[in-house]
Image (tube, helix red, strand yellow):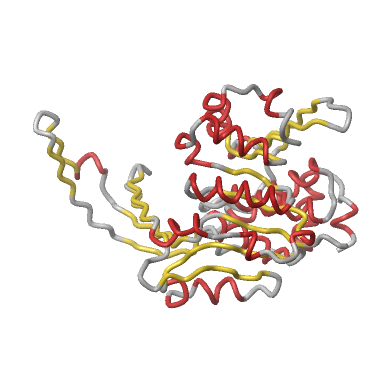
Amino acid sequence: MLKNKVLVLGSLAFDYIMGFKESFIKAVSINQDKGEYQSTVTADSRHQFFGGTAGNIAYNLGLLNIAKVSLFGSVGDDFERLGYKDHINQFSNIELLVDIYDDLFTAACYIVNDIKSNQMIIFHGGALDKCKEINLIKKVPNPEEFIYAINSTQSVEAMTNFAIQLDDLKIPSIFDPGQVTPLFQKERLIDIIKKSEILIGNSHEIMQIKEKSELTEEKILEYVRAIIITRGSGGSELIYKDENKKIFKYNIPIATPAKVLDTTGAGDGYRAGILTGLMLNMTILDSCRLGAIISSFVVETSGAQTHLFDIKQVRKRFFNTFGYFPPEIERI
């Protein structure tokens, strides 16, 4: 049977980005002795974007239009009212499988940037907290059709449940704990790593994983096929073992974007490239290189789901960056 589906798990959220023309330092009053805090920030701009790890990954998979995507999550009634549902449904290759809670809001992240690029961030989970109740065993009738799943950042309980369910369904998974890594208990973190095929995170997150689990890279590679470390403008690193248990390390440069406006969601674009490459049966190295290409388009616009590209642009930028076409991309 042709495995042409990927399963995307993670957050669906609205991002509200605001600007403040002063420094937060001038707007904050703190009395350490009394434990008193006062801050008044008047934003001069406000923009709403579609976001969340799962939403960002799915959007890029939609633009690529190669893999069939099953996108799971939990959202509030504002998900449709504020246009997110129609935004995702524009892609014919994405099956939107969200649970809607009429009494809750979709997760939201409120970010204020001051004149010095300092950030004040408030996150409200809302319906996202209900993801832990999703049962993939009941919702995925044909698991043999899925080449990979990505278990990306949300609550520890939800990611734990999904790791167990994906293992039961025999769907290989990418584990992407992200910024919630410190919330994992050691044994739970190790257990999920053992149930995963690929571990991905930025350099700080991978360091936290090693410290929390007390596992070296070599020990982690006894459980997973590969470790992928993203380094922002520094590119990324792939560490993997072959069938003979030999370990290889490759540094992967970034693809040069036409311009850089906003790096939000670049890592999620990278993950969409990896998933697409694996679905096409590309090598894991070429899949990571495809990830670097996709992430370069993300940074060219403000917001994680506002950029556009097509496969011709992807091929051109891949060749300009790496000097060749993977045959799997060339055939599309």
Quick one: 274 or 198, which is closer to the camera?
198
Residue 259 in sight from this viewpoint: yes
Q: Is residue 198 above or below residue 108?
A: above
State the image quarter where residue 69 is shown: bottom right
Quick one: 141 or 249, which is closer to the camera?
141
In the picture, measured across the screen, residue 175 lies left or right of residue 313, that is left
Quick one: 67 or 286, which is closer to the camera?
67
Q: Is residue 96 above or below residue 193?
A: below
The quadrant in which the N terminus is found is: bottom right
The residue at the point 29 percent across, 60 percent down is 44
Across and down, in percent, residue 215 comes to: 62, 23
In the picture, measured across the screen, residue 200 lies left or right of residue 280, that is left
The residue at the point 80 percent across, 57 percent down is 315
The residue at the point 36 percent across, 55 percent down is 124
Across and down, in percent, residue 171 comes to: 73, 52
The quadrant in which the C terminus is found is: bottom right
Across and down, in percent, residue 54 comes to: 57, 57
Residue 302 in sight from this viewpoint: no
Across and down, in percent, residue 42 comes to: 23, 56
Count of numbered labels shown in the rendering: 0
In the picture, measured across the screen, residue 284 lies left or right of residue 293, that is right
Quick one: 225 or 27, which is closer to the camera?
225
The residue at the point 55 percent across, 47 percent down is 159
In the picture, measured across the screen, residue 258 lies left or right of residue 225, that is left
